[in-house]
Amino acid sequence: MRFRAWLAALLLIAAALSVLPEFQQGENLIPLPQARRDVLSTAAQVAVTHPEFTGSLGNLARRQGYLAYARHLAAGLRAPVTYTGLLETEDLLLRRLRDPHSVLTELWLPDSNPDLLPVGFYWAADGLVVYRVDGSPAALQTGDRVISIGGLGARGLLRRMRRYFSGNLPWLKTLAGEELPLGNTLRWFGLVQGGTVRLELERPSGTRYTLAVPLVPQSLAADDAYTQGRSAFVARYLAPQGMAEPQGQRFYAWRLTPDYGVFWLTSSLDTAGYRKAVERFFQAVRTAGVYYVVIDLAENPGGYATIADPLLRHLPLRPAMQADVPAAVRTQSPAEVFHGKVYVLIDGGSMSAAVYTAEMLSEWGEAELVGQPAGMATGAFVGAKTFVTPDRRVAYQVSTTFLRPVNGVQAASLEPEVALPVTVRDIQQGVDPVANWLSDLATPRVKT
């Protein structure tokens, strides 16, 4: 079950956003008949592609309602139609699907010169907080609570996110923390005045202050430090012992301590190297005799749901679920089955196949979910294909398949059984709840 979209989704969204301000007042216009054809063509393609309207989920009334909505959007376009206006209309059309996989991917226009706010944000369980600072006025400090950005408070920011992006609340908060440093996002949301963004902040002491922070010209490629969010916390796996698998550019790695083993996946690519690493990991776990295994799918945007297969081969399977488990997993060797405790880490950045994998490990392999609510509903739209509008100006993705929830019960998010929320106070004090939870696994216990 292949799904590439979310491996690059944030970059693609940022690419689309990056062109908007450059053309709002320019002469790059689209003839009104062509713009309307583009919108209606996109709707027609969605209607014969997206599982909301096809296959077992297909519903004629929903399809007709969707096409009527597209006709309404097309009729609402007025000359002159800018590329910005077309992009926003296409975005509304795709957002109607409530599917974070079906998104705009590219607006084919000359590159703009993006800039950014030199401040990184993280949406904690109890509010938005400054996560990192680079070159801003000295008064701004990591850990300051964000009261408003450009005069818009947290609820207003979430409403703007819902206006332009699909997904559940954990995903929107994750995406907001990653998109808000981008100057073009801030402009699209109407939060920039005279090249600066007004931040209202609160110190840990409770003192509030306001600061006008100028945008800094910088390429999006250099923005990784801001758009990667909590991935900096991966450092918890690097000390005091090194990785048993080299990190480098790999999307997987594992580490073994005397008390637990951690297998870490930053994306869900099912490769031969990954499968071999899983085998080496569980062999090392058996040899060391550790009791706990942690599979880390936090911040994993997805890929192939088949990454679950090599993991499930080493987990005891629920007897009632045997018929649902893939045949390749049911041939597991009893000698290779791990009989300790298995945990799976998830959070708001866990998407697509990563969520489906966590479901399978929990429902079929008796793993316990730990962390924060996942960034997607149980069950998933996957298998995105890319299309372009008739004038080849706008590219977009549409999901082709729906994977039903593993246990048959659809929920707005995959919820952890062991909740590890990250609070504003945690950020202020440099506390990582996951690292603390891992340290608790090292407390003495009698191995059985």
Image: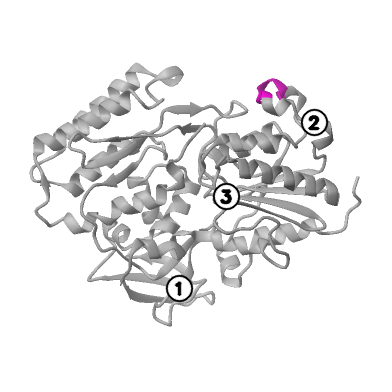
Residue 130 drawn at (x, y percent):
47, 68
- Graded by Cα atoms within 10 Å as few (under 14), some (14 to 19) or many (20 or more), the crowding at tag 2 reads few
Name the residue beneath numbered marker 2. 333
Name the residue beneath numbered marker 1. 133
Mark sitting on residue 146: none
Residue 55 drawn at (x, y percent):
42, 18
Tell me which amino acid carries mark 1.
Answer: Val
Seen at 33% across and 46% down, the residue is 163
Name the residue beneath numbered marker 3. 347
Q: CA distance from mark 3 to mark 1?
A: 23 Å
Choose between 147 and 429: the one closer to the eye. 429
Q: How is the image coloured?
A: one colour
Tell me which amino acid carries mark 2.
Answer: Ser
Residue 444 position by quadrant = bottom right
Q: Secondary structure at mark 2?
A: loop
Tell me which amino acid carries mark 3.
Answer: Asp
Does residue 216 appear in the picture of this structure? yes
Residue 32 drawn at (x, y percent):
9, 38
Residue 92 position by quadrant = top left
Q: Which residues are magenta?
A: 321-327
Choose between 351 and 205: the one closer to the eye. 351
Q: CA distance from mark 3 to mark 2?
A: 32 Å
Q: Is residue 49 left or right of residue 109?
A: right
Residue 441 drawn at (x, y percent):
78, 56
The answer to the question of whether label 2 and label 1 lie on touching residues, with beta carbons closer than 8 A, is no
The rendered magenta stretch, by its main secondary structure, is classed as helix
Seen at 33% across and 68% down, the residue is 218
Q: Nearer the viewer, mark 3 or mark 2?
A: 2
Q: Is residue 152 left or right of residue 252?
A: left
